Amino acid sequence: MTADVELGAWAYGRTRAMVATTARAFALLFDGQALDVVCPWCRGVTPETPAGGARTRRVRDLFGGRDCRHGQPDRRFCTECDQQIVIVWENDCDSPS
């Protein structure tokens, strides 16, 4: 029985990640979606793009890690759960808050 539980937990984690990746690709989920904007302060200079131009702004759901209290397996798909959507810079930049 424990092998089935372990396999189920592994499969759940893998498929949840696949669903999230696909949903972000089709812009069905906000959390993690990259915006097509270059930071005006750092000009998108990152360790991966030293010449600049990286898209470092992302949309994040601050409550994304919480569980749904309305029976949905993933709270991002629940229409009753609170969503706190923000746009953040994901770069070490000295931009004003």
Image (tube, rainbow, N blue to C red):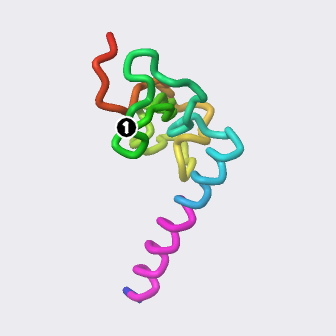
Residue 14 or 46: which is nearer the viewer? 46
The amino acid on which the numbered mark 1 sits, given as a three-letter code, is Thr
The secondary structure that most of the magenta stretch takes on is helix
Q: Residue furthest front?
A: 51
Residue depicted at x 54% and y 59%:
16
Residue depicted at 55% across the width and 47% down the height: 71
Q: Where is residue 23 in the image (x, y as percent from the top left)?
A: 65, 48
Q: Which of 66 and 58 is in front in this view?
A: 58
Query: Eyeballing the image, is 44 above or below 69?
Result: above
Give residue 19's quadrant in the image: bottom right
50 with respect to 22 (left or right):
left
Q: Residues within 10 Å of mark 1 (few under 14, many from 20)?
A: some
Q: How many marks?
A: 1
Mark 1 — residue? Answer: 46
Looking at the image, is 25 positioned above or below residue 27? below
49 and 37: which one is in front? 49
Left or right: where 44 falls relative to 94:
right
Q: Position of residue 90 (x, y in %)?
A: 38, 33
Image quarter of the N terminus: bottom left
Determine the residue located farthest toward the top in the rendered image.
96
Residue range in magenta is 3-16
Q: Quadrant of residue 94?
A: top left
**Residue 92 among those drawn in magenta:** no
Quarter of the rendering occupied by the C terminus: top left
53 and 14: which one is in front? 53
Residue 35 spot, x, y in % from top left: 57, 29
The reply, left or right, for residue 78 in relation to residue 6 is right
Instruction: Give yes or no for residue 15 being in the magenta stretch.
Output: yes
